[in-house]
Amino acid sequence: MSQVPSKPKRKTAPIPPTPAASTAWVKVPEPSEAPPEVQALFAKFLEKTGLIPNVARNFALLPEHFLRWFRYYDFLMRSEEHSQLSRKEREMIAVVVSSENRCEYCLASHSAYLREISGDPVLPEVLAANYRRADLAPRERALLDFAVKMTQDSPTMSPDDLIPMRAVGLSDEAIFEAAQVAAMFNFTNRLANALGWKPNEEYYYQHRTPKADE
């Protein structure tokens, strides 16, 4: 009885190793490879902070996506004139949402930003560990409770979830802005987690000394 020839094994393409120094699991372009508009942003980052955030380098794999995302992100998180929330409140939302999503990148970077803005090196640590134990103003607690509910279980949310924010004087515009900040970090957290984005090491060391009382 003749043997049935076995099917040849299908060859699979080898998986290239991720370089140890890489900041993501996909290709990260060199800054010199970026289009002029992206390079101009990189230069601003270097001038202001002394580093190019890895999120910018990683996102620049698709330059037009990066530029459009960054304009919205920068306006949402850094605008003073057009914001209903303080920068501290926005960064607190960023830290707590990133903690809920266990996002190393955003937790490292936005903890550093919050330390800088608040002058308090302890606050981000407490928020990341358990914001419910933090010494917060009623307005801050209402914002963070809302952001966490939106992160954990948004399909079950109802008008009742807005009541605590209205009770502390937050307008509908402020509530809408808070929802956008929470949504922004649910978006970036998932990108960073899914693609292995590594934070700049500098974030872990920045702004650890309390600001002196003026």
Image (spheres, rainbow, N blue to C red):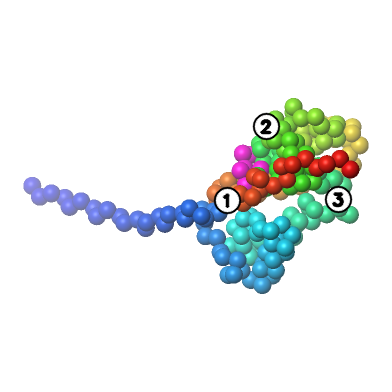
Quadrant location of the C terminus in the rendered image: top right
User: Does 186 appear above or below 10?
Assistant: above
Q: Secondary structure at mark 1?
A: loop
Residue on which the image places disc 1: 197
Report if the CB atoms under discs 2 and 3 are less than 8 Å apart. Answer: no
Give the magenta-colored segment's residue range.
101-107
Residue on which the image places disc 2: 129
Between 61 and 91, the one lying in front of the other is 91
Residue type at mark 2 is Ala
Q: Compare marks 3 and 1 and give the one earlier in the sequence.
A: 3
Q: Nearer the viewer, mark 3 or mark 1?
A: 1
Residue 174 x, y percent position in the rendering: 86, 44
Disc 1 and disc 2: Cα gap in Å?
Answer: 21 Å
Residue 208 vs residue 18: left or right?
right
Residue 127 x, y percent position in the rendering: 72, 34
Q: Compare marks 2 and 3 and give the one earlier in the sequence.
A: 3
Q: Compare marks 1 and 2 and give the one earlier in the sequence.
A: 2
Disc 3 and disc 1: Cα gap in Å?
Answer: 29 Å
**Which mark is on residue 83?**
3
Report if the CB atoms under discs 3 and 1 are less than 8 Å apart. Answer: no
Q: Residue at x 91, y 37 (%)?
A: 169
- Please tell me in which quadrant of the rendered image residue 165 appears: top right
* Disc 2 residue crowd, few under 14, some 14–19, many 20+, Cα 10 Å: few
Between 29 and 143, the one lying in front of the other is 29
Q: Secondary structure at mark 2?
A: helix
User: Does 83 appear above or below 163?
Assistant: below
